[in-house]
Amino acid sequence: MSARAKTHEIAGQGLTGQEFTYCRELMLRFDPTKAARAAGYSKPEKTGSALMRRPHIVAALQHLRAEQLERLEIDADDVIRELARVGFSNIFDFYRIGDDGEPIVDLTAAEEARGRVVKSFRVRETQYVSGEVRKTLHFELHDKMKALELLARHFGLLHDNLNVTGIPGPDEQRKAIEDLTPAEAAAEWSRMVQEA
């Protein structure tokens, strides 16, 4: 029996074996093309995105995501809270100024929640010719601007399509041009040429 003939059920959606594998892989890989390739589709570049438009696939994926969030005990507030931690993090939560005026890394004030905003952390040991050994701490915080952008999008503070009231867009301009008589179009053309 082929993989195509087998039917799997997810949230009342009947899926072929390949579709079922695709959904499971997409939950792991987050990439439609890679998921389609792993599911054995011959043209994963086209099929991966095409599957994302099929209502029964979308319903199955929504169900799988809901199950995953329940298993992980994560909700939307947890995600927003974590983005806010990163977005409003401050490098000075990890530094203090020493008596000599030099910055000193001070992690004693960094509570566990703040520690989650650290992307990478490493200690470098350098030995000098004099025999002195110095340890240098390097750390990088997660991308603050990306977190703020995601928060702004979530709260509707960013709009990708600029719509300025009173200025006709391309569709309105085309319609206005199409509605002109030949004489009106010629007059409009003359007016535009004179203004230029």
Image: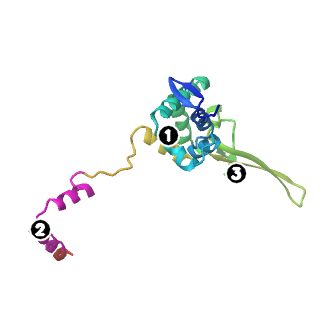
- Of callouts 1 and 2, the N-terminal one: 1
Q: Compute the Cα span from label 2 to label 3.
A: 81 Å
Q: Quadrant of residue 108?
A: top right
Residue 40 position in % (x across, y down): 63, 42
> Cα distance, mark 3 to mark 1?
59 Å
Horizontal and vertical percent position of residue 96: 65, 44
Extreme-front residue of the structure:
1
Residue 142 appears in which quarter of the rendering? Answer: top right
Residue 45 in the image: above or below residue 35: below
Say which amino acid is labelled 1: Met
Q: Which residues are magenta?
A: 165-192
Our reading of the magenta stretch's main secondary structure is helix
Q: Nearer the viewer, residue 135 or 80?
A: 80
The residue tagged with tag 1: helix, strand or loop? loop
| Residue 23 to residue 147: above or below | above
Q: Secondary structure at mark 2?
A: helix
Specify the label residue 100 is tagged with.
3
Distance from Cα at disc 1 to Cα at disc 2? 47 Å
Amino acid type, mark 3? Asp
Residue that carries the numbered disc 2 in the rendered image: 182
Would residue 65 be seen by someone viewing this image from the given angle? no
* Image quadrant where one finds the C terminus: bottom left
Q: Residue at 54% across / 44% down in the picture?
A: 48
Q: N-terminal of the two: label 3 or label 1?
A: 1
Of labels 2 and 3, earlier in sequence is 3
Q: Is residue 190 above or below residue 75?
A: below
Q: Is residue 34 visible?
A: yes
Residue type beneath disc 2 = Pro
Q: Categorize mark 2 by other alpha carbons within 10 Å: few (<14), some (14-19), many (20+).
A: few
